[in-house]
Every structure is written in C-alpha cells, then in structure tokens.
C-alpha cells in the first residue's frame, strides 16, 4: 500500500512546522457531531495575520484497537516509512 503523494506532502509540511515550532493543539468541535476534538494544526503567518491549518485530530480511545499496521514481509509498493 503506497502513501498518496498529497498525504506525503502534507506530512512534510507538518514536519517543517514542527521544526520551526509552528504547531498548535487546539480544542475544536466536530462539524458533524459537535463532540470535542483535539486538533493538530500548523500555524501559518501572513504579516500580522495568523491561520491555523488543521492536519488531524488526536485519537479517542485505544488506537491499537482501530488501526492495523502493514504486515512485515509483504511486498511494499514504495518506501512508505518516514524517519525522524
């Protein structure tokens, strides 16, 4: 399974924001349910203006129950590992 180029580009943007200290964790409301979500955002600046660009939210509950990692030994369709 290959990571789409658009997701890889967004992840790289998130890494650059982290390196510059331009990340924020914001409490927002889910647009559909109204439930609170804790959203990881990159901080964009344009002169005196600020913009918070959402990238994803923190998982509620146990993420190990909801995600299945790639199976070791299965052929990869590309290098989908990002090393920090």
Image (tube, rainbow, N blue to C red):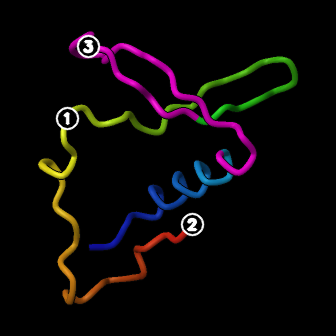
Q: In the image, is 38 to the left or to the right of 71?
A: right
Does the magenta portion include 10? no
Residue that label 1 marks: 61
Real-space CA distance between mark 1 and mark 2, rounded to the nearest whole angstrom: 25 Å
Question: Which residue is painted at 65% across and 47% down in the image?
Answer: 18
Q: Residues within 10 Å of mark 2 (few under 14, many from 20)?
A: few
Q: Which mark is residue 2?
A: none
44 or 15: nearer the viewer? 15
Considering the numbered disc 1 on the image, is that residue within a helix, a strand or a loop? loop
Residue 29 in the image: state x and y as whole percent: 35, 13
Residue that label 3 marks: 35
Residue that label 2 marks: 84
Considering the numbered disc 2 on the image, is that residue within a helix, a strand or a loop? loop
Among numbered discs 1 and 2, the one appearing first in the sequence? 1
Tell me if residue 69 comes above or below residue 33 in the rendering: below
Q: In the image, is 38 to the left or to the right of 24?
A: left
Residue 23 in the image: state x and y as whole percent: 62, 36
Q: In the image, is 49 to the left or to the right of 41?
A: right
**Which residue is at the far left?**
65
Among numbered discs 3 and 1, the one appearing first in the sequence? 3
Residue 42 in the image: state x and y as whole percent: 61, 36
Real-space CA distance between mark 3 and mark 1, rounded to the nearest whole angstrom: 14 Å
Residues drawn in magenta: 18-41
Considering the numbered disc 3 on the image, is that residue within a helix, a strand or a loop? loop
Tell me if residue 43 comes above or below residue 83 in the rendering: above
Among numbered discs 3 and 2, the one appearing first in the sequence? 3
């Amino acid at each position: 399974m290959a990571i789409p180029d658009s997701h890889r580009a967004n992840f790289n943007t998130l890494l650059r924001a982290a390196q510059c200290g331009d990340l924020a964790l914001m409490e927002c409301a889910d647009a559909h349910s109204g439930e609170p979500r804790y959203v990881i955002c990159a901080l964009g600046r344009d002169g005196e203006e600020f913009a918070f660009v959402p990238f994803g939210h923190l998982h509620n509950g146990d993420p190990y129950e909801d995600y299945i990692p790639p199976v070791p030994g299965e052929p990869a369709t590309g290098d989908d590992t990002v090393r920090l």
